[in-house]
Each structure stands twice: as C-alpha cells, then as structure tokens.
Image: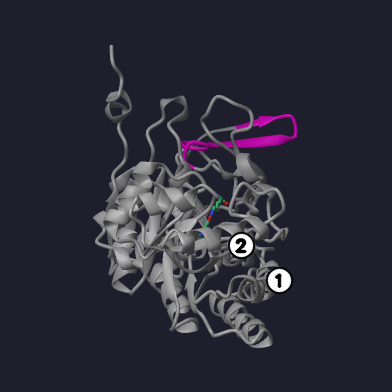
Amino acid sequence: MDGLTAGALSLFPDGATVEDGELALGGIRTSELAQAHGTPLVVYCQQTLLSAVRAYRTAAPGSLCLYSVKAFPSLALLRLFAGEGLGADVSTLGELAYALRAGVPGERIVVHGNNKSDEELAAAAEAGARFVVLDAPDEVDRAAAAGIERVLVRVTPGIEADTHPAIRTAHHGSKFGLTPEQALVAIADAREAGLDVAGLHLHIGSQLLDSEAARTGIEWLGAFAADCRAELGWEPRVIDLGGGLGIRYVEDERPPAIGDFVRTLLERLEHAWSLHELEHPETILEPGRSLAGHAAFTLYRVGVVKAAGTTTYVAIDGGMSDNPRPQLYGARYSALLANRAGEEAAGAYTVCGKHCESGDVLIDAVALPEPRRGDLLAVPGTGAYTLAMGSNYNAVPRPAAVLVAGGDARVIRRRETVDDLLAPEIT
Ligand code: LLP
C-alpha cells in the first residue's frame, strides 16, 4: 500500500483494509459487495458505529445521548444505538415514526422542529416524549393545548459557528429558537400555562471542526441561566447541548475526537455553572454526523472517463441524487479506486455524477490511478446526510445500504426501483 492509499484509507470506517490491492470492509471485498448488492451502495460498518456511540457514552456517562435521526433515518441504526442506551432526537412526524418503530421509548425521545404542526405536537404527546423543544412564541399555547407536559426552550444567543452558513443555527437572525428576550417570556408563559419547563436547548451549528463556538455557547448559557434565575426565579435543571461535532471528509480536516470534544463541553458547563452558582443540570447530547458519518462509504461503478479541456471526468452511476452535499455546502470528499487501491496515482480526476446538470460534480480533483470503465470508486464519510438528503432527481432510484458486521453484509435499506418511483403517479 503506498502512502497515498494509507492516507485516504484513514478516512474510511475502522474495519476497512486493502487486501490484494482491493478495498475491503470487515474482510468483505468491495467487488463482492458490488456484485451482491449493485451500485451505488452505501456500506456501513457496525464496529465504527459502535465505537462512536461508546466514545459518547464513556465521555458523558451521566448524559442522555440522543441520535439525531435526520443524519440517516434508519431502523437498523436506531435499533443498534438504542441497544447501547441511546435515544433519538426527531424533528418531524416521519422521524418520530422511525424512532417509535425502532422501539425507542418515549422517555428517550426529544422532539424538535421550527414549525411543528398540530399533528406533530399531538404525536409527541401521545408518544410520551421526554421533552418537546419550544422553538417559537406561539408554541407555548399550542404545546399546552396538545397535552404536552415537559418542555425545553431553545435559545438563539447570536453566536456564529465556524461552519458553512447553511448549517449555522445560533446566529442573530436564525430561523431557529427564540432570542434571549423571547425565551424569557416563553419560559414565564409556559410555566403559567402549567407546562413543566425543564430547561434550555442550544444547537450552535453542524460540522464543527473545533469546540470554540460550542464553548462560547455554554458560557453564554450559564450567564443566561443566571438571568433566568434573577428575573423569573427559575433555573434550568436540564441543558440540551444539541449536536454539531464534525467528521473528517478529507485528509486536511482535523476535527477533535468525540471524547475530547464532549469532555471539553462538559468541563466548560461545570465551570460556567459553578461561576454563576447554579445547580448542576442534567445534560443531553444530540449527535448525528459524528455517530453515523464516518461509519459508511459509498461504492460507485465508474462509467464514462473522458477529457474535456484540462479536466478528465470520471463519471459514476450516482451523484447529486445520492449525495447533494457538494452542491448545497461546497462539501469536499475524497475517494479511492476500490478495486485497484494499491496502485500509484496517475493524476487528478474530477468525479461527476450522471445527472443532467454541470453542477453534478462530487469531487473537483482527486488523485487516482487512471480510472477505467467498470472500476469501483469508494467515497468515504457518507454515513450522514447523504441517503437522508437524497432525491429522485432525473427519476433515479435511491441506492441500497448494507451494514457490515461479523463478516456479513446485511441489507438495511433496499435499493429503490423504478416502480417505487412510479407508485404515487395517478393517470
Ligand atoms: N440537534 C439539532 C437540534 C439539530 O438541528 C441537529 C442538526 C443536530 C442535533 C445534529 O447535528 P450533527 O451532530 O449532525 O451536526 N444537512 C447538513 C447538516 C444539517 C444539520 C441540521 N441539524 C449537512 O449535510 O451538513
């Protein structure tokens, strides 16, 4: 294996190896996976999922840890995580249905949403959700009317996380949460309405590559909790810190390890709370990407390889319908030529999809051996926000997903068919 492959391999799940020049996961060769399940195929590694969960549980043994279902709504992942004691953070009726179907108990479900429908509030009440997170002034009365008992209040302190603007959530002008002034009113109103206002929620943003904004957010929360005590005679007994920890998509990104990130946040909380002489709160964490993202790669089949001016395009059998993150966030990815993973790079190639627009480029430039039709291209870091945000653009069915464990690859989501696409049509 050359240095290039070793570096790229570190972006793949823990069980990934190169055997006889071919990428394998948990001892299963990628060519076997492609042959058995077709491509594109999202390949999850159970060992990597479990080690991420355990890193959270070890660093925060006293916190309630919730998988943020939006990262990849999957019964298999939810069941695996629930077996490790995790709950679920849901933000729609559909995500709630996934959590309930997977057997996650209501007391381990927190319900979010910046525009919850009456149906969603009623379903949260019926599920006995641990908390509904109030996100707008009019949700106080609507939650009470829906029979919700326990709530958190989501606050927006005006902190700009260092991440793509589309996935910042705590800045001034955000569509999420309540300003500090609105939050004070909502807390008072909710208590007046008979709701148990258990605490506060703050989600700074996503794909954070350091803990700075989160630390600032926690300091702010401590001061705000003290304001709540001074103004309302109420202080939070629960603090939900949301999710946000990023993963490494390309070699030059260096996010903190889960354990370091979580410990830093909890220490900061401890410090802020003792500074303001507040009662130590229960804590909730809501990771999504850092649980599922690094645990999967997507396997594509190479089709057309062609030069256009100074660019050589390598076209794969998927694209923006199975991963729209490059188009939405300018996200960068890396790749390995899975069936020739031991070969020297021959140049930098542009990986494009099969969709009918020029913007359907998955990777601008990646060093690969000269790709040929029929090769397999593996793109790491696709376990979160890829299948979850996929579409059927160009009437392309979405890929299957498999979970590799114990030398076996189990289908956890079947490949869509053209009949699936045609099913809702009415003629
Ligand atoms: N809790 C709340 C209230 C959230 O809004 C989110 C993510 C999370 C937890 C989980 O955050 P994570 O640990 O995954 O960063 N589609 C985007 C990411 C959107 C994240 C939205 N909220 C992407 O592909 O980068």
Q: Which of marks 1 and 2 is nearer the N terminus?
A: 2
**Circle 1 sits on which residue?**
216
The secondary element bearing badge 2 is classed as helix
Specify the amino acid type for callout 2: Leu
Q: Does the magenta stretch include residue 261?
A: no
Q: For this view, does 117 lie left or right of residue 348?
A: left
Which residue is pictured at 65% across the width and 43% down the height?
349
Give the magenta-colored segment's residue range: 306-322
The picture places residue 281, in percent across and down from the top left corner, at: 51, 80
Which residue is pictured at 37% across the width and 46% down the height?
120
The picture places residue 83, in percent across and down from the top left corner, at: 29, 71
Q: How many labels does the image show?
A: 2
Quadrant in which the N terminus appears? bottom right
Q: For this view, does 122 lie left or right of residue 225?
A: left
Alpha carbon separation for disc pair 1 and 2: 20 Å
Specify the amino acid type for callout 1: Thr
What's the coloring here? one colour
Q: For this view, does 306 lie left or right of residue 391?
A: right
**Circle 2 sits on which residue?**
184
